[in-house]
């Protein structure tokens, strides 16, 4: 795809590190926690690294958002997931397409996890690069916490059969009181989950949020057999970089007890502090000078995600030039996040590094 103007971005959280690649038509996020956490907008099926429960499957995603004037915006994608008998997992993310588009979509990212070595590997087929992070635990399952600022209710939906497996359904609703997020009246976010105890994954999820629309996730083409071992290895021809989790933690800033620094900011993903999730992420634009020079590369930012989900105190750690540094800052200033949660379950301010990668295609 030739890029004449910047397109919405590819967003990849890898332990509080966010990469934006300007080459796709809909934002794509890395996998986030699966379970009844209504503040999370799912962009990846949660696959626990459980041994002796191998399978392969397709995950159908559909996002539908109706604007105030009645316009309906729909996108979908077909991702692929797998788990082998050793508990290794693979999450293959494909490009989002319009609701009426073809199922033939490009692979834009592959995430592998090996529980034996606690290593996460992020593969980028676009650049033929592989980033390995050692020492990482799998993403934890999150749930609404007692004492949070939102009221929760749960409804048992009974059981049904999906893909030949019995699943149990649950609907969870949260009421957001007036003024908690700048809203002038209360609103309700609801989600239902159909969980397979046998495979320990959700086979169907549906989330409705008046702020961003309705998302449906459906596991299809489920095959309970051992996947090809090559699915869990780095392909030939990839340039591999390795980082320890401690290096990424240090990059986010020095911290003291329980992941909090001396200035009161928490380190995302450290201790019992979660990682903030971007929920509104307008994309930076190329400048005319950078486009004319065919400049590609990365701008590294450091910022604070406040307890309200705003991006503040943005500084440029690594520059790219030709106006792209300023464009990256301007875009990130507009981003809105689901803030990180601290040890008590309440929102906390966190410091995170952000890598914004500009690439013309």
Image (tube, grey):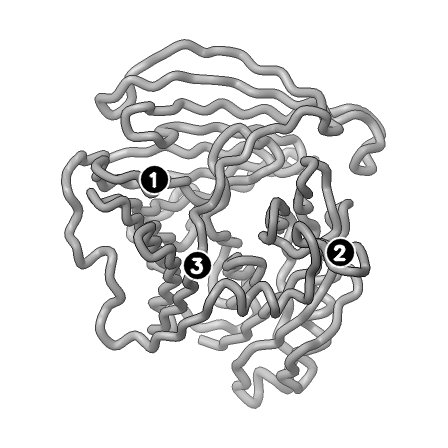
The residue under the point 33% across, 43% down is 49
Q: How far from the left and from the top, in percent, is residue 349?
A: 75, 51
**Is 119 drawn above or below residue 125 in the view shown?**
above
Query: Residue 53 falls in which quadrant of the image?
Result: top left
- Say which quarter of the image contains residue 216: top left
Q: Residues within 10 Å of mark 3 (few under 14, many from 20)?
A: some
In the picture shown, does residue 169 fall above or below 330? above
Label 1: which secondary element: strand
297 vs 148: above or below: below
Figure quadrant of the C terminus: bottom left
**x, y percentage for residue 129?**
36, 73
The label nearer to you, 2 versus 1, is 2
Residue with the mark numbered 3: 135
Determine the CA span between mark 2 and mark 1. Answer: 37 Å
- Mark 1–mark 3 Cα distance, whole angstroms, equals 28 Å
Quadrant of the drawing holding the N terminus: bottom left
Reading the image, the residue beneath label 2 is: 265
Please tell me which residue lies in front, 233 or 178: 233
Mark 2 and mark 3: Cα distance apart in space: 23 Å
- Left or right position of 260 against 4: right
Q: Residue at x 18, y 59 (%)?
A: 230
Foreground mark, 2 or 3? 3
Q: Which residue is mark 1?
A: 59
């Amino acid at each position: 795809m030739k890029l004449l103007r910047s397109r919405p971005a590819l967003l990849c959280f890898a332990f509080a590190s966010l990469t934006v690649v300007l080459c796709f038509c809909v934002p794509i996020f890395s996998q986030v926690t699966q379970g009844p956490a209504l503040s999370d907008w799912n962009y990846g099926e949660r696959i626990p690294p459980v041994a002796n429960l191998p399978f392969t499957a397709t995950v159908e995603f559909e996002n539908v958002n109706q604007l105030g004037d009645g316009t309906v915006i729909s996108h979908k994608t077909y991702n692929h997931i797998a788990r082998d008998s050793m508990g290794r997992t693979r999450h293959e993310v494909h490009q989002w397409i319009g609701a009426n588009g073809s199922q033939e979509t490009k692979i834009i990212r592959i995430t592998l996890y090996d529980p034996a070595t606690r290593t996460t590997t992020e593969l980028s087929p676009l650049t033929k690069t592989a980033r390995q992070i050692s020492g990482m635990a799998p993403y934890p399952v999150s749930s609404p916490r007692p004492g949070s600022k939102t009221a929760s209710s749960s409804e048992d939906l009974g059981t049904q059969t999906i893909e030949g497996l019995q699943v149990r359904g649950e609907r969870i609703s949260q009421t957001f009181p007036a003024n908690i997020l700048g809203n002038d009246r209360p609103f309700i976010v609801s989600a239902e989950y159909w969980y397979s105890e046998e495979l320990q994954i959700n086979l169907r999820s549906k989330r409705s949020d008046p702020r961003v629309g309705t998302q449906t996730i459906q596991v299809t083409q489920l095959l309970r057999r051992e996947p090809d071992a090559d699915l869990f290895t780095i392909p030939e021809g990839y340039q591999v970089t390795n980082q320890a989790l401690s290096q990424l933690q240090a990059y986010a800033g020095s911290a003291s007890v329980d992941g909090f620094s001396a200035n009161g900011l928490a380190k995302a993903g450290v201790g019992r502090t979660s990682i903030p999730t971007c929920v509104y992420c307008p994309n930076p634009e190329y400048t005319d000078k950078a486009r004319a020079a065919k400049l590609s590369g990365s701008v590294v930012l450091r910022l604070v995600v406040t307890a309200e989900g705003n991006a503040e105190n943005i500084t440029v750690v690594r520059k790219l030039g030709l106006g792209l540094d300023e464009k990256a800052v301007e875009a990130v200033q507009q981003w809105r996040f689901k803030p990180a949660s601290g040890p008590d379950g309440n929102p906390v301010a966190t410091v995170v590094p952000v890598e914004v990668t500009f690439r013309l295609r």
